[in-house]
Image: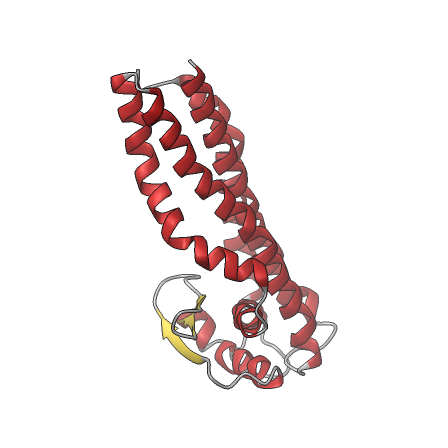
């Protein structure tokens, strides 16, 4: 009942794309992590310059652990950068830091998709962890109501993943534009600083495809 080769067949393209995107992102980051920006500013300094130019002074910039664990926390107004980004004057570090600063600028400007994504976080966490349990309980007890509840909960994960795409794309677009106007990188350096952002966006595309294929599989099993 629980092992279904059709699930592996449906998920294979998404899993392959996710693996390729992750590998490409790491390789691109490492490639331009060896290229120092002419300005010599670190990732933390680049983020601070972007925020200052945008007139945002209430966002803290902190160091965090983990490789590419960089993120902006809208609840605490904190931009957290990994050590490889926080202290590095590389084009990769600047690209990542400016991207996260782009999220802070989105927040300050009340960018609607960011607010929608933040509002969905609690429900998405419930859907991500609870949908599997409820759905397979529905299979065990042959209960259509539980099956459809599992489908509904996982639909929240799909919606969250889809909304994430414009949020991440917009943050990268802001970063690509503002890192030049703020004097952090030269126009010639910008494509290389932005390369890691383009690669990272593929991981979000892969996540959307994976979520959609999982939802389709759930619907297929529920119909049976």
- Left or right: residue 75 versus residue 211 is left
Frontmost residue, 99 versus 125:
125
Which quadrant is home to the C terminus? top left
Residue at the spot 45% in from the left edge and 57% down from the top edge: 119
In depth, the one of 97 and 25 nearer the eye is: 97
Q: Which colour assignment does the render follow?
A: secondary structure
User: Farthest residue in the top direction?
Assistant: 224
Q: Which image quarter holds the N terminus?
A: top left
Rendered view: 50 above or below 28: below
Residue 59 at x, y percent in the picture:
46, 80
Residue 173, image x and y in percent?
Answer: 66, 64
- Answer whether residue 135 is visible to the viewer in this image: yes
Work out which residue is located at the far front of the displayed protein and give it: 145
Residue 160 against residue 146 in the figure, above or below: below
Q: In this view, does 215 lie above or below 166?
A: above
Q: On the image, which quarter does residue 148 sit in?
A: top left
Quadrant for residue 3, please give it: top left
Q: Position of residue 74 (x, y in %)?
A: 44, 69
Q: Is residue 121 left or right of residue 32?
A: left
Q: Position of residue 120 (x, y in %)?
A: 44, 53
Residue found at x 47% / y 71%: 85
- Count of numbered circles on the image: 0
Res 24 visible? no
Question: Relative to 64, is 18 above or below?
Answer: above
């Amino acid at each position: 009942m629980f092992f279904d080769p059709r699930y592996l067949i449906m998920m294979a393209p998404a899993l392959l794309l996710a693996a390729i995107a992750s590998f490409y992102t790491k390789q691109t980051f490492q490639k331009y992590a060896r290229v120092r920006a002419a300005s010599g500013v670190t990732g933390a300094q680049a983020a601070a310059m972007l925020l200052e130019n945008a007139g945002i002074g209430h966002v803290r910039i902190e160091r965090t652990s983990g490789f590419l664990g960089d993120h902006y926390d809208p609840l605490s107004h904190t931009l957290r950068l990994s050590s490889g980004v926080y202290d590095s004057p590389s084009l990769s570090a600047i690209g990542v830091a400016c991207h996260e600063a782009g999220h802070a600028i989105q927040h300050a400007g009340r960018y609607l998709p960011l607010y929608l994504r933040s509002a969905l976080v609690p429900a998405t966490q419930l859907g991500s962890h609870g949908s599997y349990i409820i759905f397979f309980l529905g299979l065990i007890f042959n209960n259509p109501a539980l099956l459809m509840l599992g489908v509904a909960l996982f639909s929240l994960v799909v919606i969250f993943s889809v909304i994430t795409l414009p949020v991440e794309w917009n943050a990268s677009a802001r970063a690509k534009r503002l890192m030049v106007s703020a004097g952090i990188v030269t126009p010639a350096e910008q494509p290389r600083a932005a390369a890691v952002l383009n690669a990272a966006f593929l991981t979000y595309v892969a996540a959307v495809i994976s979520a959609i294929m999982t939802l389709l599989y759930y619907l297929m099993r529920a119909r049976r």
